[in-house]
Amino acid sequence: MNEGKKTDWWKNAVIYQIYPRSFKDSNGDGIGDLNGIIQKLDYLENLGIDAVWLSPVFKSPQDDNGYDISDYQDIDPIFGNLDDMERLIQEAKKHNIRIIMDLVLNHSSDEHRWFIEAKKSKDNPYHNYYIWRDGEEGVLPNNMKAGFGGSAWEWVPELKQYYFHQFSVKQPDLNWENPKVREELYTMINWWIDKGVGGFRLDVIDQIAKEPDKNIKENGPRLHEFIKEMSSKTFQRGDIVTVGEAWGATPEIARMFSNPDGSELSMVFQFEHIILDRQEGKEKWDLAPLSFIKLKKVLSYWQQELFQRGWNSLFWDNHDLPRVVSYWGNDTEYRVQSAKMLAVLLHGMQGTPYIYQGEELGMTNAAYEIEDYRDIETLNMYKERKGAGYSESDIMDSIHAISRDNARTPMQWDSSANAGFTHGKPWIKVNPNYKKINAADQIDNPDSIFTCYKTLIALRKKYNIFVDGQFELLLPDDNTFFAYKRQNQNEKLYVICNFYDETAICKLDKDWEKMELLYCNYKEISKDKINIYKPYEARVYYCHI
């Protein structure tokens, strides 16, 4: 059992996200697996990370790449088995790395034994584990839409009922109003805690208290009641980290989720800085121009609102998002410089940084033809928009920009066939730029993006100010520089980033010569031109007060 004194170890930690099917294949079937991750623990320890968040490896039909779980207490054969999982947990500990599981508690797979039973009859004891409404075929309970397209209601003829699903029809929503459902989930969570896991990432956790009859998907009235109950019966037993995915979180809600009293979760993923490309009232695929000033305001706002009242998650990338160097950076001429700048910008803030696999190498988006995509959301959108008369080029422009598969291309380990990911045929096409962008070329290169991340992680562990310093945005209306100060009782930290591809003069007037330059993503700084910043140049200055 993993009980013991609870600490806030995660405030000093850096967490690395692995999308297992794309990380490392050990058996040649073209799909990454748990033994492949074990083979790369030396790489992760070298980087300096403290924990690994695994996207779901539970048994699943893989309708949504594992986010449709058919057995919470077994491992999908494509990744290995329970023995492999237990070995990964133990081997990772030898590298001082904790394993964080990705739990999907909002819904299960329709192939979960609970749902199979639930469909047998209205009197079945498992029927009320899910959300049903009486009706007649073709007359929907209401007009709620599913996240992956179409209605959120699916007709079951033999029961003459609809079941509710916020995502795929193969992902029926669990009924959290039923205490038996909650107890089953808590028992399962404690089973994993007893196996020694280091924590949990909770998928779309802000949707578990939905009220379908009122069109409430997120932040339902019983949400925090449910979270507190779950925390008291599970998470508070062990010294673990918990992070909730909460697309609908405001700072006020995030402060409840991450209350320093530990009654709910350690932190949440909020996405306000991620949705700056959204047009109001439009779908995610209808992209708006990115606003640098809005980015500054949003990140600054969250830094200030959670200071001493909650805890931030810091991330640019994950398995659902485009590659940050292709999104906010410059993935061609200044790929290395802009990737480093974006790393410096994020890792200097308060919160727990998350690195998504390949981010530390500057991996980029992949512009494929439609037949090379595998993501259900992407393929559904393509089909819907083709049917609605959108042009092929407009559809593909959106897919190339933000398809979830941009993040899911195989990890680029070296310049050998399939980027060293597999000896077989990869489940999804490898980005063709792997001969130029790969880990083997970067690990021992002092000027690489990998080394930049490694340095930033080491700095975070050396200086307390990265953890406890108060944040102040500098030059808020400047259209070129993202600059901020962190300060605690004894230290000051300045982070100055030229966000664009032209040399620029920084208007901050400080005595930089008297401060220690902790990091710069260029080799040399001209002392007589200390306020001149090269394209995408980023610096971190430090001093004692």
Image (cartoon, helix red, strand yellow):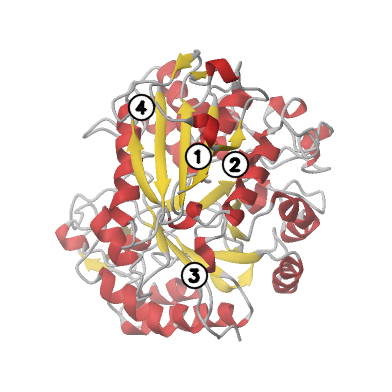
* Residue 151 visible here: yes
Query: Marks 3/4: CA distance?
Result: 33 Å
Which residue occupies the foreground of this view, 65 or 410? 410
Furthest-top residue in this view:
502
Which residue, given by chain and number where applicable, does mark 4 sit on?
Answer: 292
> How far is disc 1 from disc 3 in space, using C-alphas?
32 Å
Residue kind at label 1, given as amino acid type: Arg
Q: Nearer the viewer, mark 1 or mark 4?
A: 4
Q: Secondary structure at mark 4?
A: helix
Q: Which residue is mark 3?
A: 8
Q: Secondary structure at mark 2?
A: loop
Determine the image quadrant of residue 446: top right
Amino acid at pointer 2: Arg
Residue beneath disc 1:
404
Q: Are the residues flagged by discs 1 and 4 in contact, CB closer than 8 Å?
A: no
| Figure check: 473 above or below 307 | above
